[in-house]
Image (spheres, rainbow, N blue to C red):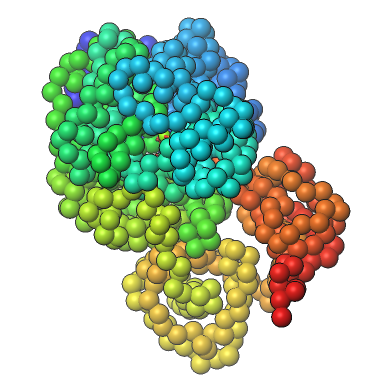
Amino acid sequence: MPESDSASKIGLSDMKLLVANRGEIARRVLRTAQRLGVPTVAVYADPDAHAPFVSEATEATRLGPADLAQSYLSVEAVLTAARRTGSTAIHPGYGFLSENADFARAVVDAGLIWVGPKPEAIDVMGLKTDARRLADEHGVPIIPGFDSSQDDGDLAAAAATIGFPVLIKAAAGGGGRGIRVANQPEHFDAALHEARSEAERSFGNGDVIVERYITRPRHVEVQLIGDRHGFVVDLGTRECSVQRRYQKLIEEAPAPNLTDETRHGLRDRACRLAEAIGYDSAGTVEFIVDDNTGEFFFLEMNTRLQVEHPVTEYITGLDLVELQLRSAAGEPLADYLSDINLVGHAFEVRIAAEDPAEGFTPQTGTVSHLRVPAGVRWDSAVEAGTVISPHYDSMIAKLIVGSSDRTSALALLQSALDDLIVGGVATNTGFHRWLIDQPEFRQGRITTRFLDDNPPPAPRVSLEAAGELAASMWIADQRMALEADVWSQSTDFRVTPTGSTQQLFLRHHSGEVVQVDIGAVGDSSLTTVSLSADGVAINVSGSNHSYQVVSRSEMWSSAGMLAEADASAVVAPFPALVAELPVVAGDRVQAGETVAVIEAMKMLHSLPAPGSGVIAEVAVAVGDQVDSGQLLIQFAELGNNEDNESAP
Ligand code: ADP
Ligand code: ADP
Ligand code: MG
């Protein structure tokens, strides 16, 4: 693409761009603006004051406290920041206010350039119910479903008519939230309740759609780009079928293994829909492709830049943020897009601070070390030293690789994941490395159900064995008297036992304390390791463990606390916000019954009663921010569940 001819400079020359987002996408947008010579403004909430995106902008201004409603989701705070800094344009990134039509209108009304589609397009695609209707009207196939009443009985009746399994999903949904599957009629009411309450909390709108659940679903989407002069084209397909909890994990472009008929059908219908609404920016139409039949159905249209846009940039050689900025500035895009060639194959892997060995619970902490392999695109929110707070999404980076064809791109991805080291916090890197070895993935035949049907294997190493490894690393490091922040990597690390009977206490990130007899530290193989003055992060057989080295006295106090908590209480497993407390003191609950729902990094987690018993105290209130290990629910008396008691 021509970098900046004189004509195009005019369109962008007055721009001062405020990026109303954070993390990797804020940095991504800043990069292009800077390349085009556009001055930039970063806005941030308090926990992000020292985040890389803040220092990388030309200037930065505070939005407010951590609370989203007072910062990244506050129309008022963002517009005030724009006024204060003399910004002339706003790029919303993805998530947050990016699909909020009222915000887009407010930006335009304030005389600023909105770097996104016209607000009417956001509006019409904002509710999945409206979008379905529109798609249907324009000949885009939709999934058989029901959305004409919100009455529980009507929805249940519709589910019976559609036939189980059904999918219940938030009409105002996004980011995979407010979606539940009901496999049989008995599960419908609970699934409906969960979908509604998550939707209510996430979107302030509890309306749902009941749809037929496609049983071999692939998620394939089409990237679109349009300008303010009626020009719109598609930039090919992306496959996003590797998902967990309806959220994408790995994406690729183009989507593999589609017949020409399906591929052309998808691209054609996506363009048709975009043309019908005069779409004038970057956007994506998402489809479900039934892998059994090749049939495809409209899912939704995302009227913004997508997380996975880099894979399309790889195969087109285009910069989608540049095209968004030019379109917003009123430039015609036809010249830039007259000769689109889709060349090569690209993958993107979403690196999240989540621990696969612990049910993918979100992790907080400080990134102690970072090693990014050469030859990859690394769109990241973090640098060594960045603190990952519990307030936002757990995605911390995207690893993107591309090559001439799928096989060679896959080989690059494999070695990149082998070489990537994110130290100090557990991430899903090892899990991704396992995933891309699965035959279904290698063949490009994965469905969105894959991870439900093929859960990742339990880590083959015990906490103790991993602890021994961590200890051996730490000891070796101490012995070599290396600098505090040194890291090392080894595929087959061996330590020579000291012969002494010294003991070391390590606290695993789950809170559990492991006692390691140093004399027993043997040899094992591990893939990645990082070390700091008081801790070790290791990846063993695809699972991440981080340990803090603790003294004997610390060990006893924390172990004591944990032991007591385990027996008769429910504690927060990680830093979170208390979302729901379905019980009060005096309630009698059964083992496994949900006694608290907490939210961290945009996901809800239900915490079950550890046994049957009576609740003595609910120690927190809805809306409280709680720390890892903090007491939530105290039981007065707690037994095993009733069945066990009466068992012989
Ligand atoms: P993509 O298809 O680009 O992955 P997602 O739907 O997964 O898009 O969402 C992208 C990001 O935006 C995610 O981090 C998600 O948490 C966030 N997000 C999506 N929709 C919303 C919404 N309505 N409100 C807040 N955040 C959202
Ligand atoms: P969101 O706005 O949260 O992204 P989508 O409608 O795009 O919601 O759905 C998210 C994911 O849920 C899809 O990528 C797909 O994996 C799955 N999904 C949605 N609808 C269905 C369906 N009817 N049958 C099977 N899977 C579905
Ligand atoms: Mg979607």
Looking at this rendering, what residue extends furthest in the bottom direction? Answer: 499
Query: 466 above or below 374?
Result: below
Count of numbered circles on the image: 0
In this picture, is 608 found above or below 323? Answer: below
Position of residue 269 relative to residue 574, above or below, is above
Q: Position of residue 531 (x, y in %)?
A: 47, 66
Residue 432 shown left or right of residue 591 in the figure = left
In this orientation, which residue lies closer to the viewer: 608 or 417?
608
Q: Is residue 144 left or right of residue 335?
A: right
Position of 539 relative to 22 (above/below): below
Whether residue 585 appears in this view of the structure is yes
Give the residue displayed 51% in from the left and 75% down from the top. Answer: 462
458 lies left or right of 334? right
Q: Measured from the top left, where is residue 176 in percent x and y?
A: 48, 39
x, y percent for residue 315: 20, 36
Residue found at x 24% / y 50%: 444
Q: Position of residue 582 (x, y in %)?
A: 74, 46
